[in-house]
Image (cartoon, rainbow, N blue to C red):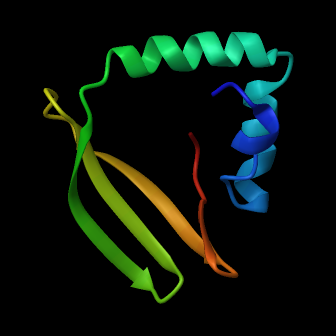
Amino acid sequence: KGDKTVMLQSPTPEARKVWEKMLAGKTDEQMKSEAAEATAKLAGYTIQKREIISADEVVIHFSMIGQKDVAKMDVKKMGSDWKISGDL
């Protein structure tokens, strides 16, 4: 939606530092425009595999519909929330 404050609630504290640098200088309008452009190109995604590291850490393997490449997203449970622990 282009809301930096909301977006920065998604990562772990360690990953947040990287995200803050990546988003530095971008306005909410720029983020909204970039998000709209990126999502317009996506048909969706398919989770290929869930790799359980521990009770509070999982690696999600997924691919975008129409693409063969499989990406990974590391997530960690913090309290009752799951947070992205890697790069965006």
> Does residue 38 appear to the left or right of 22 in the view shown?
left
x%, y% of residue 74?
Answer: 48, 60
x%, y% of residue 54?
Answer: 46, 87
Residues 88 and 41: in front is 41
> Does residue 32 appear to the left or right of 75 in the view shown?
right
- The quarter holding residue 35 reads top right
- The quarter holding residue 8 reads top right
Q: Quadrant of the N terminus?
A: top right
Q: Quadrant of the C terminus?
A: top right
Residues 8 and 52: in front is 8
With respect to residue 15, does 59 lie above or below? below
x%, y% of residue 5?
Answer: 82, 40
With respect to residue 73, does 39 lie above or below? above
> Does residue 69 appear to the left or right of 16 in the view shown?
left
At 72% across and 39% down in the image, what residue appears?
A: 19
- Residue at the farthest bottom position: 55
- The quarter holding residue 63 reads top left
x%, y% of residue 73?
Answer: 44, 54
> Does residue 76 appear to the left or right of 62 in the view shown?
right
